Amino acid sequence: MYLKSFQMKNFRKYREENNTIMFVNSDGIRGKRTPPKTEEGKDTPQIDVASATTLIVGKNNAGKTSIIHALTKIIKNTETGGFQISDFNFSYLKECFDEYLKAYGETQKTGAEMTFKPPFMEFVVTIALEEDSKDLLTNLIPFMLLKDIDNGELNIVLRYEAAEKSEFLEAMKSALEKIEKKRSAGEKGSEKADAGKEFQIFLRELEKVRFQIKYYRKHTEEEKKEQQEEQQSEEVEGRFKISDVMDIKFIQANTVRKDEELSDAFNKIISYRYANTVSNKKAQLDEQIDTMNDEITECIQGHHSADINNAIGKIISSDIMGVALSSDITEEKLVRNLLRYAYVEKGMNIPEGQFGLGYTHLVKIVAELIDYMEHYPEEKYNGRINLIAIEEPESFMHPQMQELFITNINDALQVLKDDREKNLNSQLLITTHSSHILNSKIHMGDSLDDICYVYEEGGYACAQNLSNVSVMPDTKEKEKDFKFIKKHIKYKVSEMFFADAVILVEGFAEESILPFYLEQDPILSKRYISIFGISGAHAHLYEKLLKTLRIPAVIVTDLDIKREAKSSGTTQEKISQITELTGHKTTNKTIKHFNGGSDDLSQLGSHIEADNIFVTYQWKIGEYCPTSFEEAFILTNAYNSILNDILKGTKATFYKNTVEQNGTLDFEQNIKRSYEWQKELSNAKGEFASRLLYALVTEPEDKRPILPEYIENGLKWLKEKLGQGNEYGTEQFRAGKEETGR
């Protein structure tokens, strides 16, 4: 058996939706998956941590650690769970409080008895049962029905709720009467302040109520039909504890707090090993310790006790108080306190206090795993679900170490397993906001399975479980395209899992200069926006992933108008400037995808919006329709002195033959011959982008060129989606999809 899913309701930032975390299946836990080979073509180790790990990713304060805390509370403290009123979702408590106020008013009018429904937190543990396993299911009998065995899973419902409803009603009555008394006395401030004070009264009275964890079995669909609509489960009586079937080892983040951190960790391990390996010499050791205690005690009492007691006797009579000093050496103290560790580096012993925090943290995690392996009860192999939860292991680690973290842990566990000759049946749970650890998980396991993406929406924490199927593109060659996505994620795109928004661009120029313009924006500069170069019109392949992550995404792409060659078959193109889109087609796969599969530009609007995705591309500037970023930038800034200096520096000859004719500057040629400029710059886009970025950074603000309107419109949409923008802006933009090509 293994933990299949865990659901939280009304716990901290989680409410009643998007609150389920799926865990790695048994194939990953037991090594039944076919692991990918290494780059050298070798088989991966027996233990495949990447496949056996459920990775929880998300930004800071998204709700990742709350998942581990909830599991730890219900497993380690089975009566109360160690929960407090502060663990309730406060939005939920406020809703309850408003309902109580309303109901109390009604009861005051009618004289009816108060029947308020107490607040609760609910946790659903779904355990998967395997047909071919030798799992001992004795402890699960209270929750098991025949249908559970047939379905291969069962649900254990834990509710943190009022122990006695009558006690809760009395507390609420007291709270509401106090509030009514204050209202009657005319104690008023601002409406907001008064509401806050009343809610605090409610919380203080609620804290006086005894809460406890109760166990329930979920009703089947047939049972639900027979029972009252709100009765979804049945309380399980008896002495069942979730700890009988589940255990968790929680390795917390940022645990390096003193120089002796590793000494403490390894002393615990050595002490345990020592106690289990020297039993044959224990009598001899005990005799030696007794001798040492006698000798030290004799010395202390002979030379020091009398002096100390004489001094005390000057203040307090020796008949009332004295001091007896003696040695207290024990086997445990010898092992735990007298061992010190140094680390060998290039043949030299380095004191623990000089060891880097990153390596210390990594070794501390390994030490915790060693301790776990040492105490792992092999008799529980088939009778209990074992969880190892590691919180944000990336603390203090440089990027390369983060990237190798899963590999390092994999190797360490394998060595420990082989050394102790133990069967390991544990699920690993790692929370992280490291794109490097995410990369490692994806590429070691060659999969996006078993990744839980935690995000915030509407003030609530939400969990979205990823899988290969959920993000695989809907294309004819989806397997090949998915392979591209996984490879591209490795290079940079994994950052989108932790971003406020993303911008996907085609070319090097957009990727280079857009960060500068974002930095100048007072709104967007305060948000974490990742910009990714897709290298071609491949942005549509990310549609499902972007929608799964639910973050605003702007796709900046090129029109890529199909241009016909002359009938002679030469490579010379017939069209140099385009004045309208009617009758033209695009070769851009992203535009075709979001345009319903059509390549016809005649009915294309200035942008395409699909849920959280905004696709923008070149649009008419003056008389002409540009078809690339460079052409659009030139048309937008044709008269800008900085741009002209860049064009002259990049393509001196062409600039002289077009703009610098007859000793005069004719900037109008930048407009009339914009497509020729595009063709001329096709082999110098990197130089153009580099020169432009240098000028943007070094030249005065009032002289800088501006972004083309189609990109500006994308940024305006982004600000609105992030909840801080104004109206879109131009009338053309507002018209949006109603516009036709011109």
Image (cartoon, rainbow, N blue to C red):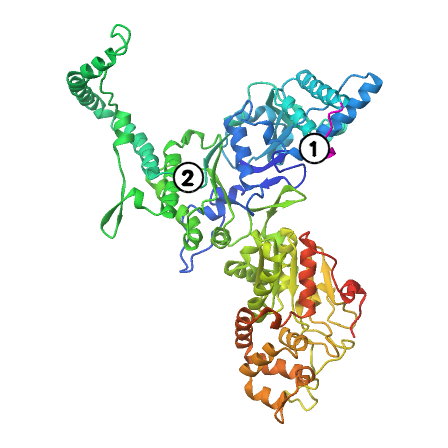
Q: Is residue 14 visible?
A: yes
Residue identified by numbered label 2? 255
Q: Nearer the viewer, residue 334 or 270?
A: 334
Residue 461 x %, y %: 62, 41
Q: Nearer the viewer, residue 361 or 148?
A: 361
Element assignment for label 2: loop
Residue range corresponding to the magenta coloring: 186-195
Quadrant where the C terminus sits is bottom right
- Under mark 2, the amino acid is Thr
- Under mark 1, the amino acid is Ala
Q: Nearer the viewer, residue 555 or 720?
A: 720
| Category of crowding for the residue at label 2, using alpha-carbon neighbours closer than 10 angstroms: few (below 14), some (14–19), many (at least 20) | some
User: Is residue 628 positioned above or below 385 on the image?
Assistant: below
Residue at the image point whose x is 22% and y is 20% from the top: 327
Residue identified by numbered label 1? 193
Magenta stretch contains residue 707: no
| Category of crowding for the residue at label 1, using alpha-carbon neighbours closer than 10 angstroms: few (below 14), some (14–19), many (at least 20) | few
Q: Is residue 403 left or right of residue 260?
A: right
Tell me which label, 1 or 2, sits earlier in the chain.
Answer: 1
Residue at the image point whose x is 75% and y is 26% from the top: 101
Residue 413 x %, y %: 39, 43
